[in-house]
Amino acid sequence: MTRIALVLGATGLVGRALTEDLLREGKWDEVRVLGRRPLALTHPKLRQIQVDWDRLEQYSEQFSGVYAVFCCLGTTIKQAGSQKQFERVDLEYPLAAAALARAQNVKQFLAVSSMGASTKSRSFYSRTKGRTEEGLIAAGFHGLHLFRPSLLLGDREEFRLGERVAAVLMKGLDFAMVGQAAKYRAIPAARVARAMMNIALADTGGVHIYTNEVIHVIGKH
């Protein structure tokens, strides 16, 4: 079986680490990346396709023959500029990609969500993530895998002061994050990426949600 991976959002923390992992792992025959701009990365198995996310349907052929789609799309309301723009990136684009993937009979769909994702949340951010999860579940994939990490650790291209301060604090408190507090531990983006790849290779059917403490475990190796 030809195993092709398709990564959405490869310029972000998790997406970049995931793309590098997929290219290092010998079990993938091709790694396709859809993005607005190319990565500064070359590899014989890498195919980079620049896309207009608002016209994603024009790139439906890129989902053909794909075994697993890894959706790492995400932004912040501040970075997006408005709640409407945030919804476009974190809700509309993932669901549009899911529809194209489902139409092309993609077997596995894996997506980065967020801790606290729920359509009943008082937080607009968490509520939007919950809506995205519901939409992905409704798509009906053979295997759907939703990852809910806590604060992501890693070097972003853009500077986010709030996240930088929070990361320093949470690193310092990591030793105390045990028991019920374990679910709040900050997590390296590379570990989330590795967890996603490990799950995809396991070829598990059904809908699965991975909480932060579970991601810490399955992304270790």
Image (tube, helix red, strand yellow):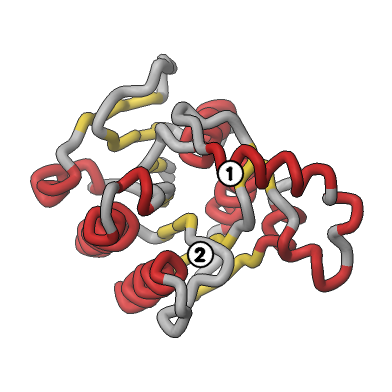
The quarter in which the N terminus is drawn is top left
Residue 110 vertical placement versus 135 (above, below) = above
Residue 116 vertical placement versus 74 (above, below) = below
**Left or right position of 202 against 171:** left
Q: Is residue 208 visible?
A: yes
Inspect the image, locate mark 1, and give the three-letter code of the amino acid beneath it: Glu
Q: Which residue is mark 1?
A: 163
Q: Where is residue 29 drawn, in percent x and y?
A: 44, 33
Which numbered disc covers residue 75? Answer: none
Q: Where is residue 54 drawn, in percent x and y?
A: 14, 48
- The residue tagged with tag 2: helix, strand or loop? strand
Q: Which residue is mark 2?
A: 146
Question: Residue 144, located in which quarter of the rendered image?
Answer: bottom left
Residue for point 28% across, 48% down: 81
Task: Tell us which disc is closer to us: 2 or 1.
Answer: 1
**Left or right position of 194 against 64:** right
Residue for point 50% across, 64% down: 145
Q: Where is residue 2 drawn, in percent x and y?
A: 40, 41
Residue in the foreground of this view, choosing between 102 and 80: 80
**Left or right position of 188 against 1:** right
Q: Where is residue 8 drawn, in percent x and y?
A: 35, 43
Question: Residue 148, located in which quarter of the rendered image?
Answer: bottom right
How packed mark 1 is, by other alpha carbons closer than 10 Å (few <14, some 14-19, many 20 or more), is: few
